[in-house]
Image (cartoon, rainbow, N blue to C red):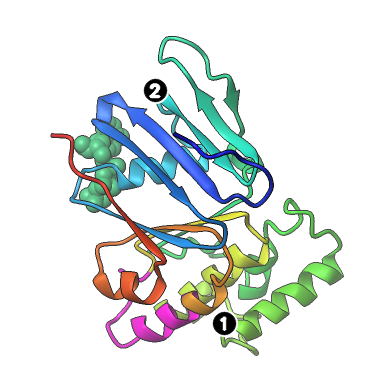
């Protein structure tokens, strides 16, 4: 059962995607990091897609701080509520940084802030510079992604996600593509910047769980 929701109640989700054999329900307290773990093919990515608005479950509901992300009561009917992806206030970070190759680090961080309500180029620029400093990259603002190491690019991606003040952050194996020597510092950076940010993190790595997770939801394979 879902809890009673007012403001800042965190995330509550229950969903079924029959074709993918996925059925689950979990809640994340406001500001907590929930690790979503389970075997290959158990539905972790499917869950992130449904939360971010790129996949409609057959049945299910998701609520985030009092906003209904989706309410799909019946597979034969249209959803009662379907909040479009761009209006969900969700930040997404995967193992690939997905920075725009033609934009500088600073412009990558500024991208998207406008839609998040941070208007005015000056305000966005100053906030992006603050974030560059926060991720340890002061002075790197003009560099394009190809002029950054993998770890530096992931730091910029982290800044881009957090600079838009997301209500929910989704992490899909955020450290999996990094060299073993780069991962611990970025894991620590994530722990710092995610303090107080409601987050769902897919990971296969115990070190991520130990450093970042407040709670763990294990998906048991339905097959
Ligand atoms: N595009 C798709 N079309 C149909 N079925 C899919 C599609 N993508 C994934 N599936 C199926 O949905 C199920 C859940 O897959 P999903 O990718 O969500 O698992 P996962 O837990 O993220 O796995 P992994 O740990 O390997 O990334 C699997 O049975 C998979 O084969």
Rendered image quadrant of residue 110:
bottom right
User: Depth check: 178 or 10 in front?
Assistant: 10
* Residue visible at 64% across and 86% down in the picture: 133
| Residue 168 higher or lower than 24, as above or below | below
Q: Residue 101, position in %: x, y?
A: 53, 65
In the picture, the disc for residue 58 is 2
Q: Is residue 150 above or below residue 59?
A: below
What's drawn in magenta, residue-wise? 175-190
Measured from the top left, where is residue 204 in percent x and y? 25, 63
Q: Nearer the viewer, mark 2 or mark 1?
A: 2
Disc 1 under 8 Å from ligand 1? The reply is no
Read off the residue under disc 1.
135
Relative to 156, is 130 on the left or the right? right
Disc nearer the start of the sequence (2/1): 2
Residue 11 appears anywhere in the view: yes
Quadrant (top left, top right, bottom left, bottom right) of the C terminus: top left
**Picture residue at 79% right of the left edge, 60% below the top:** 118
Check disc 2 and report its element: helix, strand or loop. loop
């Amino acid at each position: 059962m879902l809890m009673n929701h007012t403001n800042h109640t965190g995330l509550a989700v229950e969903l079924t995607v029959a074709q993918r054999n996925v059925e689950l329900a979990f809640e994340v307290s406001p500001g907590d990091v929930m690790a979503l773990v389970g075997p290959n093919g158990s539905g972790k990515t499917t869950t992130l897609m449904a939360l971010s608005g790129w996949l409609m479950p057959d049945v299910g509901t998701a609520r985030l701080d009092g906003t209904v992300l989706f309410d799909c009561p019946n597979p034969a009917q249209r959803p009662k509520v379907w909040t479009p992806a761009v209006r969900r206030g969700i930040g997404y970070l995967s193992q690939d940084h997905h920075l725009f190759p033609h934009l500088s680090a600073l412009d990558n961080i500024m991208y998207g802030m406008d839609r998040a309500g941070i208007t005015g180029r000056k305000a966005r620029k100053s906030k992006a510079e603050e974030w560059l400093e926060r991720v340890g990259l002061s002075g790197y603002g003009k560099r394009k992604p190809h002029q950054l190491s993998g770890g530096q690019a992931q730091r910029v991606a982290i800044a881009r996600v957090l600079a838009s003040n997301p209500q929910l952050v989704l992490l899909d194996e955020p450290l999996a593509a990094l060299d073993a020597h780069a991962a611990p510092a970025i894991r620590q950076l994530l722990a710092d910047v995610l303090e107080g940010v409601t987050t769902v993190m897919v990971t296969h790595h115990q070190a991520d769980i130990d450093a970042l997770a407040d709670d763990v939801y294990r998906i048991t394979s339905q097959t």
